[in-house]
Amino acid sequence: MVSKRILIELSILSMIVLTLFEIVLLTSNSPSIFRLVYMTVPMLTVPIVLAVVWKRSFATVIMAIGVLCILGSMILLPYMLSIGSIEEDRFYVISLRSFLLGIAMVVISMIMVYRPELLYVKNRPRDDGEGEDSIKVWDGKSSDGRGGGRMVNGTLLIPLRKLLNDREIMLLSVYRYIVVIIDGKTYLVSPDDYVPIGSVVVRRDGMFMGVRKAL
């Protein structure tokens, strides 16, 4: 199987070649150039698709839209120009905008797959000592292993939501865990879980810290 690094390198190379083709399309009306683009561009998008589609996440949707924008700017619009369905001046503007939008969406989708931390908000725990892997997940169970109760170590459990304000509750749907201090220890708590009374939600700049759901 082709490694992810190779896919990234091939994708970057493909985007560079696609950019060169787009420049040629915008500066030449040669039918031979159009034919070359028609045959080559679809193949150049293959590494881009493979580099993202394996993740099977929302990034795949963004990538697909981006690829369609690129194909539209380099195949559909030149065809429309050749049959007179679009004016030459409009072709240049629409093609360039569509291509840049497509490239931008492809780049964003690849960031979502390979460097998602670049898109996280500042209140996400850092990976160096505060990340998801270094903090235990709160399971909401009592110390004797019996789940489903509303007591833990003799302490009443309350919904985590009761410790949040209205603004924070509205943002819960995009979070997988919230960072909470329980009995002096830091835990990752599911937004729908229960925590003991006296638990403290960890906040930074007036907003709870948490781990966002995978995109």
Image (cartoon, grey):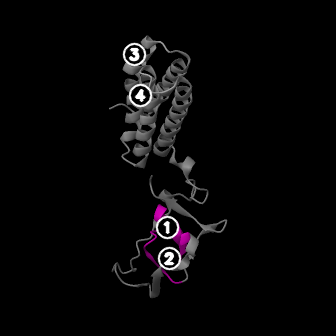
The amino acid marked with disc number 2 is Arg
Mark 2 vs 4, N-terminal side: 4
Residue occupied by mark 3: 35
In three-dimensional space, the C-alpha distance between marks 2 and 4, rounded to whole angstroms, equals 51 Å
Comparing labels 2 and 4, the label whose residue is closer to the camera: 4
In the image, which disc is placed on residue 172? Answer: 1
The x and y percentages for residue 37 are 42, 19
Residue at the image position 57 percent from the left and 64 percent from the top: 209
- Say few, some or many: other residues with alpha carbon within 10 Å of mark 3 (under 14 / 14 to 19 / 20 or more): few
Q: State the residue in front, 157 or 167.
A: 167
In the image, which disc is placed on residue 4? Answer: none
The amino acid marked with disc number 1 is Leu
Q: What are the residue bounds of the magenta stretch?
A: 168-197
Residue occupied by mark 2: 161
Cβ atoms at labels 4 and 3 below 8 Å apart: no
In three-dimensional space, the C-alpha distance between marks 3 and 2, rounded to whole angstroms, equals 60 Å
Comparing labels 3 and 1, the label whose residue is closer to the camera: 3
Q: State the residue in front, 144 or 93.
A: 93
The x and y percentages for residue 77 are 45, 27
- Say few, some or many: other residues with alpha carbon within 10 Å of mark 2 (under 14 / 14 to 19 / 20 or more): some
Residue occupied by mark 4: 76
- Say few, some or many: other residues with alpha carbon within 10 Å of mark 1 (under 14 / 14 to 19 / 20 or more): some
